[in-house]
Amino acid sequence: MTLAEWEEAVQRNAEAIMAGEKVKQLSVLYDTPQHAQQFIELAKRAGACRDLRIRCKAALLDEKGRTIISPKTKMPVIGWSDWRPDIHKAA
């Protein structure tokens, strides 16, 4: 593979990632809101970014604000939720 072919493959891969909508954890190094916020600020200064938000795994809520319960397990459905300091306080 030549350098030009490699650069083209990297560009295609980057475009596919940027077009996707799947939520992924950045890294365990940024597992606190403070570290994640610092990373977001640095990334925005460094160049083009997409969908940088602090999210956490939490019980999902319906449109009325009630916890969604799984009919199969009778437990709350867990998924990615936007992190807000007023709601997610340390124990």
Image: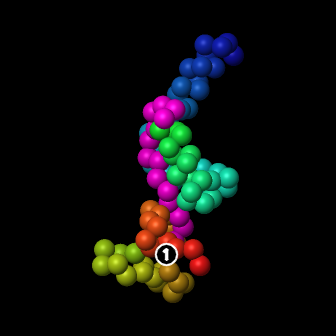
Q: Nearer the viewer, residue 24 or 35?
A: 35
Q: Position of residue 81 (x, y in %)?
A: 46, 65
Which residue does the numbered mark 1 point to in the structure image? 59
Q: Nearer the viewer, residue 33 or 76?
A: 33
Q: Position of residue 55 (x, y in %)?
A: 50, 60
Q: 4 left or right of 86?
A: right
**Can residue 91 be seen by looking at this rendering?**
yes
Question: Which residue is at a point 35% across and 78% down the rendered structure image?
Answer: 65
The amino acid beneath tag 1 is Ala
Image: 22 above or below 1: below
Question: Which residue is at a point 51% across and 87% down the rendered structure image?
Answer: 74
Image: 88 above or below 43: below
Q: Secondary structure at mark 1?
A: strand
Question: Which residue is at a point 67% across and 12% down the rendered structure image?
Answer: 2
How many numbered marks, from 0 up?
A: 1
Image: 61 above or below 29: below
Q: Position of residue 17 (x, y in %)?
A: 51, 39
**Can residue 15 be seen by looking at this rendering?**
no
Looking at this view, name the residue that lies furthest to the left.
Answer: 64
